[in-house]
Amino acid sequence: MVQNLKEEKTFVLIKPDGVRKGLIGEVIKRFEQRDLKVVALEMFQPSREMIDKHYPSDVTWVERLGSKSLSTYEKYDMDAKVILGTDDPKKIGAMVRGWLVEYMTSAPLVRMVIEGVHAVDMVRKIAGPTLPYVADMGTIRGDFSADSPAVANSERRAVMNILHASETPQEAEHEIAHWFGGKETFKYKRFGVDE
């Protein structure tokens, strides 16, 4: 549990499309404008193994991923069996997970730890909903992506949504440990924020 509410930490990963679109500075700027601090930052090329460990591989998660894809197909009156060769949620989930791994290893990523008041919720609010086509203008995803699962699935690829942000403080703790290991996060005071 965070003792000082101003020191809640969350994890952010700028994805390949965010890097390729030149949005690293913009993403950081959006967080810093809301009085959040970057306390760890690194660009790196992930291995397949690193990404494979990032995404859950348990049957429940994979099947849920497939079920979400199937509901997208149904919403847009698309036939998953014709497009993907199956309507089995487990098989579709495994395909989508594979697309995620391919996408996330296609370019360098930027990993960071963000700290501040309600950092987990603030970062998710600034990022916008996971699906860019429903994200409001003014959010990172709403301003810089229009991708959707229907388009991504029909093109057999992952949804390009600029960044990943932890959903809960517990997930943030797990992801920071996974992506930064024992690496140091920095303590410093921001003018006008920490004084």
Image: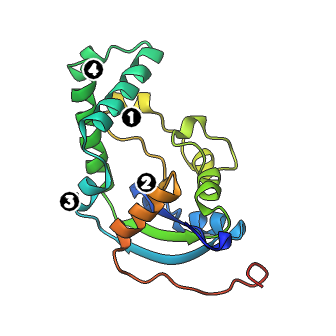
Q: Mark 4 belongs to which amino acid?
A: Ile
The residue beneath circle 3 is 49
Q: Element type at marker 1? A: helix
Q: Element type at marker 4? A: helix
Residue 127 in view here: yes
x, y percent for residue 112 = 47, 70
Q: Residue at x 28, y 24 (%)?
A: 89
The residue beneath circle 4 is 83
Q: Residue at x 47, y 61 (%)?
A: 172
Marks 2 and 1 sit apart, C-alpha to C-alpha, by 13 Å
Marks 4 and 3 sit apart, C-alpha to C-alpha, by 29 Å
Crowd tier of the residue under label 3, counting other residues whose Cα lies within 10 Å: few below 14, some 14–19, many 20 or above:
few
Q: Identify which residue, 119 or 104, lies in the foreground.
A: 119
Mark before the other along the chain sequence, 4 or 2: 2
The residue beneath circle 1 is 152
Q: Mark 1 belongs to which amino acid?
A: Ala
Q: Is residue 148 above or below residue 26?
A: above
Marks 1 and 4 sit apart, C-alpha to C-alpha, by 12 Å
